[in-house]
Image (cartoon, rainbow, N blue to C red):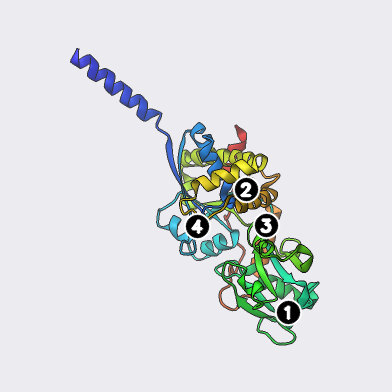
Amino acid sequence: MKTMMLGLATTTMLAGAAHAADDLTLQLKWVTQAQFAGYYVALDKGFYEEEDLNVTIKPGGPDIAPEQVIAGGGADVIVDWMAAALAAREKGLPLVNIAQPFKQGGLQLTCLKETGIETPDDFPGHTLGVWFYGNEYPFYAWMAKLGVPTEGGEDGVTVLKQGFNVDPLLQKQADCISVMTYNEYGQVLDAGITPDQLTTFNYLEEGVGMLEDGLYVVESSLEDPEMVDKLARFVRASMKGWKYAEENPDEAAQIVIDNDETGAQTLEHQQYMMGEVAKLTAGSDGTLDEAAYEETVATLLSAISPENPAITKEPEGAWTHDVTDAALAQ
């Protein structure tokens, strides 16, 4: 009898092990917010569980570089901007884009109209706030395209290294600042400045855009068929999460709040953010648009950054459709 019970227990344990969900860790580019709502929704609504995945989502922050995390084995997949990923690839970390949930870009330059800036021709002689740490490349590509020097003077612009806030505009330290459509632009409006008091330029519309939040893995992950299958299930569930978030923005915002362990976010701001983020993911099935990739590469190659060029040559093998093709096949 004891032998039969032991055998039954062993069989049960083996069956349980056979059906154990596959672990996967996702490292975000920034803190918990609606910029990453699709992943939190997929986790909350059980979409990952349906794909037999046990997903851990690690928030980012100002002191966390996703590239370093994945290089150190701390994540299987990272959310990153293509500029940072391609720069890391050229320096020896073989990151590959496996999916592109963000079809559009939200990076903009927002200026106070009272400064006299209405078109790019008005930039010379003004101070422009620019985010660095890999976010500066579209700006320098744009200035190169316009033929505007970035060392100051009447014919050039003065570059202010901007923190990730809108203080330079509010305190009149800069005439224009970097903003994301789904975050800092809303903060400017919250400060009492109205849209008609602003002139806003979208980098994509200026022809110097670059792909933003994409999903990246190290190249070796794609050499393992089982890992490719796991990644395809992850992408499929994530895109299901993004579509649900687009269709249920208020619920998605609440899910983000529920997952924010810092308590720093407010529901109202996350609702605003989700509404704007939905515009960037709309129409995406996760597949990378090759034309958008080429524009990103062209932007990075033309960016004359005085400190750190993103890339110096055309990348090879920096993206694949294999994962999204597998995800969409089912």
In the picture, the quarter occupied by the C terminus is: top right
Residue type for callout 4? Pro
How far apart, in angstroms, are the residues tagged by discs 2 and 3?
11 Å
Vertically, is 80 above or below 173? above
Where is mark 3, residue-wise? 105
What SS does tag 3 mark? loop
**Residue at 46% in and 54% down:** 262
Q: Where in the figure is residue 54, as x and y percent of width and height?
A: 44, 38
Residue at label 1? 148
Element type at marker 4? Answer: loop
The three-letter code of the residue at mark 3 reads Gly
Residue 101 tag number: 2
Question: How far from the left and from the top, in percent, is residue 35?
Answer: 59, 52
Front of the two marks 4 and 3: 3
Which corner quadrant of the image does residue 207 belong to?
Answer: bottom right
Q: CA distance from mark 4 to mark 2?
A: 20 Å
Residue type at numbered disc 1: Val
Residue located at (35% from left, 30% from top): 17
Q: Secondary structure at mark 1?
A: loop
Residue 55, how many percent across, how many down?
Answer: 46, 42
Residues 96 and 106: in front is 106
Mark 4–mark 3 CB contact (< 8 Å): no
Residue at mark 4: 94
Which numbered disc covers residue 108?
A: none
Labels 4 & 2 near each other (Cβ < 8 A): no
| Contact (Cβ within 8 Å) of mark 2 with mark 3 | no
Q: Which picture quadrant has residue 197? A: bottom right
The first of marks 4 and 2 along the sequence is 4
Residue 242 seen in the figure: no
Q: For the point 57% across and 67% down, which residue is it?
A: 164
For the N terminus, the image quarter is top left
Residue 151 seen by the camera: yes
